[in-house]
Image (cartoon, helix red, strand yellow):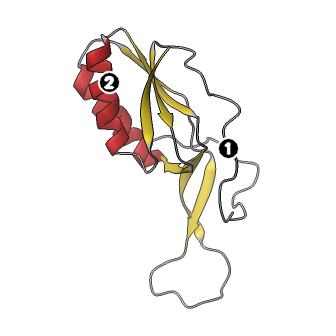
Amino acid sequence: MLAPKKVKHRKWHRTDQIKGKATRMIKVSFGSFGLKAQTAGLVSSRQIEAARRSMTRYIQRGGKIWIRIFPDRPITKKGSEMPMGKGKGAVDHYAAVVRPGTVMFEMDGVNEKIAKEAMELAAYKLPVKCKFIIK
């Protein structure tokens, strides 16, 4: 799974909501097809890996996949049955911040029908609404 090698700050402040639309990573740059987020959310490294595996399995040996998002935000969690107080919990996992309009995955080397089906399988694994786009 994806995780940063080194972080400047081990624990981050929690935010209430992700505001605004994406201003970067909004176009298909590497491949011919893309999976674009339509809603905002946090995508964990496990969800990115699950989506990648479902796409890779569907296209078998053909094509190439690019992952455009990287989970760099630490998400903390307290232990089970822990009383209130006693500080912030330990880092549990890492997540990527996704805004509406972000291209999360790209694909090339396969025809449109196969790419669309593979991207739809990947979209099931993600916590944000997605749409299939063509360059």
Lower position in the chain sequence, tag 1 or tag 2: 1
- In the rendered image, residue 103, in percent from the top left (x then y), is placed at 54, 30
Work out whether 62 lies above or below 73.
above
Classed neighbour count for the residue bearing mark 2: other residues with Cα under 10 Å, few (<14), some (14–19), many (≥20): many
Work out whether 119 lies above or below 84.
above
Residue kind at label 1, given as amino acid type: Lys
Q: Nearer the viewer, residue 83 or 51?
A: 51
Q: Nearer the viewer, residue 12 or 26?
A: 26
| Residue that extends furthest to the bottom in the rendered view of this protein | 83
| Residue marked by disc 2 | 116
Res. 108 in view: yes
In the rendered image, the quadrant that contains the N terminus is: top left
- Separation (CA) of disc 1 from disc 2: 35 Å
Helix, strand, or loop for circle 2?
helix
- In the rendered image, residue 117, in percent from the top left (x then y), is placed at 27, 27
In this picture, residue 127 sits left or right of residue 82: left
Q: Nearer the viewer, residue 102 or 50?
A: 102
In this picture, residue 87 sits left or right of residue 83: right
Classed neighbour count for the residue bearing mark 1: other residues with Cα under 10 Å, few (<14), some (14–19), many (≥20): few
- In the rendered image, residue 123, in percent from the top left (x then y), is placed at 37, 39
* Label at residue 6: 1
Work out whether 91 lies above or below 117.
below
Indicate the quadrant where residue 48 lies. top left
- In the rendered image, residue 59, in percent from the top left (x then y), is placed at 26, 20
Res. 56 in view: no
